[in-house]
Protein backbone atom coordinates (compact mmCIF):
# COMPACT_ATOMS: atom_id res chain seq x y z
CA UNK A 1 0.00 0.00 0.00
CA UNK A 2 1.08 3.54 -0.69
CA UNK A 3 0.20 6.08 1.98
CA UNK A 4 0.19 9.84 2.15
CA UNK A 5 1.31 12.11 4.96
CA UNK A 6 0.04 15.68 4.99
CA UNK A 7 2.00 18.01 7.24
CA UNK A 8 -0.42 20.31 9.08
CA UNK A 9 1.32 21.12 12.37
CA UNK A 10 3.03 24.42 11.63
CA UNK A 11 2.63 27.59 13.66
CA UNK A 12 1.73 30.01 10.81
CA UNK A 13 4.11 32.58 12.33
CA UNK A 14 4.59 34.58 9.13
CA UNK A 15 0.86 34.51 8.37
CA UNK A 16 -0.15 35.71 11.83
CA UNK A 17 -3.20 33.41 11.90
CA UNK A 18 -3.84 29.70 11.19
CA UNK A 19 -3.01 29.54 7.47
CA UNK A 20 -4.28 26.00 6.92
CA UNK A 21 -7.78 27.09 7.87
CA UNK A 22 -7.93 30.11 5.56
CA UNK A 23 -10.67 29.95 2.96
CA UNK A 24 -9.61 29.27 -0.60
CA UNK A 25 -12.52 29.14 -3.02
CA UNK A 26 -14.92 27.85 -0.41
CA UNK A 27 -12.73 25.40 1.49
CA UNK A 28 -9.80 25.54 3.89
CA UNK A 29 -6.29 25.53 2.39
CA UNK A 30 -5.46 22.21 4.11
CA UNK A 31 -8.49 20.54 2.54
CA UNK A 32 -7.18 21.29 -0.97
CA UNK A 33 -3.92 19.53 -0.11
CA UNK A 34 -5.62 16.48 1.42
CA UNK A 35 -8.23 16.12 -1.34
CA UNK A 36 -5.47 16.23 -3.97
CA UNK A 37 -3.72 13.14 -2.62
CA UNK A 38 -6.71 11.06 -1.48
CA UNK A 39 -7.41 9.49 -4.92
CA UNK A 40 -3.79 8.39 -5.30
CA UNK A 41 -3.05 6.60 -2.01
CA UNK A 42 -4.61 3.93 0.17
CA UNK A 43 -4.18 5.69 3.52
CA UNK A 44 -3.75 9.33 4.53
CA UNK A 45 -2.22 10.48 7.81
CA UNK A 46 -2.62 14.17 8.67
CA UNK A 47 -0.05 15.39 11.20
CA UNK A 48 -1.52 18.19 13.30
CA UNK A 49 -0.20 20.44 16.04
CA UNK A 50 -1.67 23.28 18.05
CA UNK A 51 -4.62 23.66 15.64
CA UNK A 52 -5.52 19.97 15.97
CA UNK A 53 -9.24 20.43 16.71
CA UNK A 54 -9.79 22.96 13.94
CA UNK A 55 -7.89 20.90 11.33
CA UNK A 56 -9.85 17.79 12.32
CA UNK A 57 -13.09 19.74 11.94
CA UNK A 58 -12.03 21.04 8.51
CA UNK A 59 -11.39 17.47 7.33
CA UNK A 60 -14.02 15.65 9.40
CA UNK A 61 -15.86 14.08 6.46
CA UNK A 62 -12.74 12.81 4.67
CA UNK A 63 -11.31 9.28 5.09
CA UNK A 64 -8.11 10.31 6.83
CA UNK A 65 -6.36 9.48 10.08
CA UNK A 66 -4.91 12.09 12.42
CA UNK A 67 -1.81 12.06 14.56
CA UNK A 68 -0.69 14.94 16.75
CA UNK A 69 2.90 16.13 16.80
CA UNK A 70 3.34 16.70 20.55
CA UNK A 71 6.31 19.01 19.88
CA UNK A 72 5.42 21.04 16.76
CA UNK A 73 7.93 23.73 17.72
CA UNK A 74 10.67 21.22 16.86
CA UNK A 75 9.82 21.76 13.20
CA UNK A 76 8.81 19.93 10.06
CA UNK A 77 11.30 17.11 10.58
CA UNK A 78 9.58 16.16 13.82
CA UNK A 79 6.18 16.18 12.08
CA UNK A 80 7.49 13.85 9.38
CA UNK A 81 8.87 11.50 12.06
CA UNK A 82 5.51 11.48 13.86
CA UNK A 83 3.66 10.81 10.60
CA UNK A 84 5.97 7.98 9.54
CA UNK A 85 5.61 6.33 12.95
CA UNK A 86 1.83 6.26 12.38
CA UNK A 87 2.04 4.41 9.05
CA UNK A 88 0.58 0.92 8.85
CA UNK A 89 3.21 -1.85 8.88
CA UNK A 90 2.41 -2.96 5.33
CA UNK A 91 2.98 0.49 3.82
CA UNK A 92 5.38 0.15 0.85
CA UNK A 93 5.85 3.86 0.16
CA UNK A 94 4.67 7.25 1.38
CA UNK A 95 3.94 10.50 -0.41
CA UNK A 96 4.78 13.42 1.90
CA UNK A 97 2.84 16.57 1.09
CA UNK A 98 2.57 20.02 2.65
CA UNK A 99 -0.77 21.08 4.07
CA UNK A 100 -0.06 24.65 2.97
CA UNK A 101 0.60 23.80 -0.70
CA UNK A 102 -2.93 23.65 -2.13
CA UNK A 103 -2.13 24.15 -5.83
CA UNK A 104 0.01 21.14 -6.77
CA UNK A 105 -0.79 20.54 -10.47
CA UNK A 106 -2.98 17.43 -10.94
CA UNK A 107 -0.41 15.62 -13.10
CA UNK A 108 2.34 15.77 -10.48
CA UNK A 109 1.13 13.17 -7.98
CA UNK A 110 0.43 10.30 -10.42
CA UNK A 111 3.72 10.90 -12.25
CA UNK A 112 5.70 10.81 -9.00
CA UNK A 113 3.98 7.63 -7.86
CA UNK A 114 4.49 5.95 -11.25
CA UNK A 115 8.18 6.85 -11.19
CA UNK A 116 8.88 5.04 -7.91
CA UNK A 117 8.64 1.46 -9.24
CA UNK A 118 9.71 2.45 -12.76
CA UNK A 119 12.95 4.07 -11.55
CA UNK A 120 14.01 1.40 -9.09
CA UNK A 121 15.03 4.22 -6.72
CA UNK A 122 13.99 4.74 -3.09
CA UNK A 123 13.00 8.40 -3.41
CA UNK A 124 11.18 10.32 -6.14
CA UNK A 125 11.18 14.12 -6.11
CA UNK A 126 9.67 16.63 -8.51
CA UNK A 127 11.80 19.25 -10.24
CA UNK A 128 9.87 22.36 -11.29
CA UNK A 129 11.77 24.35 -13.91
CA UNK A 130 15.10 23.42 -12.40
CA UNK A 131 14.08 23.62 -8.72
CA UNK A 132 13.60 20.47 -6.66
CA UNK A 133 10.41 20.66 -4.64
CA UNK A 134 7.55 18.86 -2.99
CA UNK A 135 5.68 16.57 -2.59
CA UNK A 136 8.18 13.71 -2.43
CA UNK A 137 7.67 9.92 -2.48
CA UNK A 138 9.74 7.66 -0.22
CA UNK A 139 9.95 3.87 -0.35
CA UNK A 140 9.74 1.91 2.91
CA UNK A 141 13.51 1.32 3.04
CA UNK A 142 13.87 5.04 3.84
CA UNK A 143 11.24 5.11 6.62
CA UNK A 144 13.77 4.64 9.45
CA UNK A 145 15.66 7.74 8.31
CA UNK A 146 12.43 9.73 8.11
CA UNK A 147 11.38 8.52 11.57
CA UNK A 148 14.67 9.85 12.99
CA UNK A 149 14.19 13.39 11.64
CA UNK A 150 13.99 16.47 13.84
CA UNK A 151 14.39 20.18 13.28
CA UNK A 152 12.89 22.33 10.58
CA UNK A 153 14.70 21.09 7.48
CA UNK A 154 12.06 18.51 6.74
CA UNK A 155 13.11 15.56 4.61
CA UNK A 156 15.67 17.53 2.57
CA UNK A 157 18.53 15.92 4.48
CA UNK A 158 17.26 12.43 3.64
CA UNK A 159 16.89 13.33 -0.04
CA UNK A 160 20.35 14.92 -0.17
CA UNK A 161 22.14 12.21 1.84
CA UNK A 162 22.50 9.77 -1.06
CA UNK A 163 21.69 11.29 -4.47
CA UNK A 164 22.14 7.94 -6.21
CA UNK A 165 18.89 6.67 -4.69
CA UNK A 166 16.83 9.67 -5.85
CA UNK A 167 14.84 9.77 -9.08
CA UNK A 168 13.51 13.10 -10.27
CA UNK A 169 10.50 13.87 -12.42
CA UNK A 170 10.76 17.11 -14.36
CA UNK A 171 7.73 19.38 -14.73
CA UNK A 172 7.73 22.44 -16.96
CA UNK A 173 5.67 24.49 -14.52
CA UNK A 174 6.68 26.77 -11.65
CA UNK A 175 7.02 25.30 -8.18
CA UNK A 176 3.54 25.18 -6.60
CA UNK A 177 3.44 27.97 -4.02
CA UNK A 178 2.97 27.33 -0.36
CA UNK A 179 1.08 29.72 1.86
CA UNK A 180 3.40 31.34 4.39
CA UNK A 181 2.50 35.04 4.31
CA UNK A 182 -0.57 37.19 3.67
CA UNK A 183 0.98 38.02 0.28
CA UNK A 184 1.23 34.30 -0.59
CA UNK A 185 -2.42 33.87 0.33
CA UNK A 186 -3.46 36.86 -1.79
CA UNK A 187 -1.57 35.44 -4.80
CA UNK A 188 -3.46 32.14 -4.56
CA UNK A 189 -6.69 33.96 -5.30
CA UNK A 190 -5.43 35.23 -8.65
CA UNK A 191 -4.16 31.87 -9.94
Image: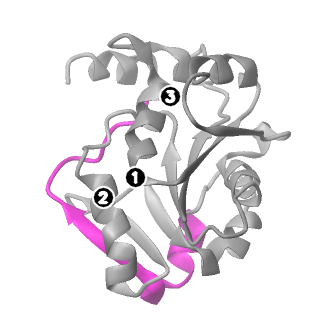
State the mark number for residue 72.
none
Label 2 to label 1, Cα distance in Å?
7 Å
Mark 2 touches mark 3? (CB < 8 Å): no
Residue at (60% x, 25% y) in the render: 12
Q: Which residue lies furthest to the right in this view?
A: 70
Q: Does the magenta stretch include residue 57?
A: no
Q: On screen, 113 above or below 58?
A: below
Closer to viewer: mark 2 or mark 3? 2
Residue 67: image quadrant is: top right
Q: Mark 1 points at which residue?
A: 40
Q: Name the residue under label 3.
A: 30
**Secondary-structure class at tag 3:** helix
Q: Which quadrant holds the C terminus? A: top left
Q: Name the residue under label 2.
A: 110
- The answer to which quarter of the image holds residue 75 is top right
On the question of residue 148 being in view, the answer is yes
CA separation in Å, label 2 and label 3: 20 Å
Residue 19 spot, x, y in % from top left: 53, 21
User: What segment carries the magenta color?
Assistant: 156-180
Badge 1: how crowded within 10 Å, few (<14), some, or many (20+)? Answer: some
Amino acid sequence: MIAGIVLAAGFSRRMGRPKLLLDLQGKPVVRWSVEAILPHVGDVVVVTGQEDSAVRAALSDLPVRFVVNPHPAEGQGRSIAVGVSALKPWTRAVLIALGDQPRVPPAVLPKLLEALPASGKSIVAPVYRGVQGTPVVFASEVFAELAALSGDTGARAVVAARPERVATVVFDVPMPPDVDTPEDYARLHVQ
